[in-house]
Structure formats: structure tokens, C-alpha cells
Image (cartoon, rainbow, N blue to C red):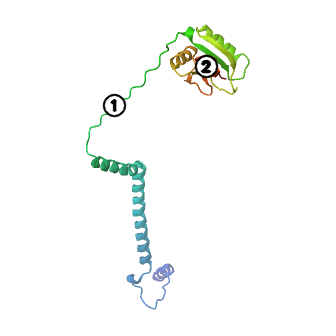
Amino acid sequence: MVVARAGLTARRAKPVIAVDYPLHYDDATVRPWRTAAFVAVSVAAVELVLLVVVGGALLAKPDQAERRPAAKAAARSAAAVPAARKVVRAVKPAPAPVAELSRSKVSVLVLNGNGRTGAAAATASSVSRHGYRVGGVANASSSDFTRTLVMYRPGFEGEGRRLARDLGIPIVGPLDGMRPEQLHGAQTVIVVGA
């Protein structure tokens, strides 16, 4: 039985490789590249953590870098200028001109500026229903007006604004593109637009 046992152990035994010199643990070539890989991975991990922290800080407050120079400049200018009291006066808007003439004494020239037949006549009848005198009905110099407007002669702004308010016309301005002689005595003009 001893022989049989020896045969079993002989089958399980690994072959022995002959070496010219003994291999020591210090001479192993496996350890240096593992150490180098560990160092490289550690450096990369530290860089990644730094990038995430810096990127997160920039994304969290992107305008802080822009505000800092402006704040420093404001502090410098405040320090350079001695403290002084500034008196700020509120500018009062000019009072809206008031119409001096009654509606029956204001003459209105109605011009067709959209090219549709009868547009100026329809507006003229609305003007007369509000108590104004119609000074004339004619065609405007062009027929491409997109909005209806009221124009007034110098000195008749109050009357022009009242006319526009009565008829619901939002655009009011001084006489433009026409001379007072072309108005035939009218103080205001309505150009009927589309």
C-alpha cells in the first residue's frame, strides 16, 4: 500500500523547473510597474477631484467673477470722490395743453390716406357728430398710411389732443409734411389710415 500511495503523490506532484540562479523577492519585475500604475491612478484621481470641485464652484456662481472687478471699481471711485450731498430735483412733466376753442370753432381737414373710397367721408361725418366743423375732405398725398392719426397746427395742440381723444385716435402730433397754407384755415387734420 505504501507503493500505491507513493504513486498517487507522484502523479499530483508538479514538475520542477531548473533555474540557473535563485529568484529573490527583491529582483521581481512585477512590483515596479504595479507601483507606477498605482501612483498614476492616484494622481489622476486627485486631478479629477480638483476639476469637479473647481467646475462645481464656477457653475454654482458664474457671475461672481464678473461682479468682483465692478465692485472693486465702484469702491475705488467711491473712495476717490469725497462724500457730497447731491440734491436731485424731480422734473415735473409739462402740463398737458388745454383746448381753448370750443369744438364748434375747431375746423378739421379730413384726408383719405388709405386709398379706400369713402373712408374720409365716413370719418368726416363722425367728426361733425362730435360737434367739430369739417373744413374739407380730400385725398392725402399718399395712400399707404397704416394707422389713422391727428395732426395740429402750432398753437392748437390742446384742440388736436381733444379731437383725438373724442374719436379714439391714439396717434397725435404736430403738423408734419404739410404747410399751414394747405389746410385752408383748418386747425387740425385727420389722416385716415387702414
Q: Earlier in the sequence, mark 1 or mark 2?
A: 1
| Residue at position x 38%, y 29% in the image | 91
Q: The C terminus appears in which quarter of the rendering?
A: top right
The answer to whether residue 78 is above or below residue 91 is below
- How packed is label 2: few (under 14 Cα within 10 Å), some, or many (20 or more)? many
The answer to whether residue 131 is above or below residue 25 is above
Q: Secondary structure at mark 1?
A: loop
**Amino acid type for the residue under numbered disc 1:** Arg
| Residue at position x 61%, y 19% in the image | 189
The percent position of residue 94, horizontal first and vertical second, equals 43, 24
Q: Residue furthest bottom?
A: 20
**Amino acid type for the residue under numbered disc 2:** Val
Q: CA distance from mark 1 to mark 2?
A: 38 Å
Pointer 1 residue: 89
Q: Nearer the viewer, mark 1 or mark 2?
A: 2
Pointer 2 residue: 189
Query: On the image, which quarter does residue 22 sit in?
Result: bottom left
The percent position of residue 130, horizontal first and vertical second, equals 58, 9
- How packed is label 1: few (under 14 Cα within 10 Å), some, or many (20 or more)? few
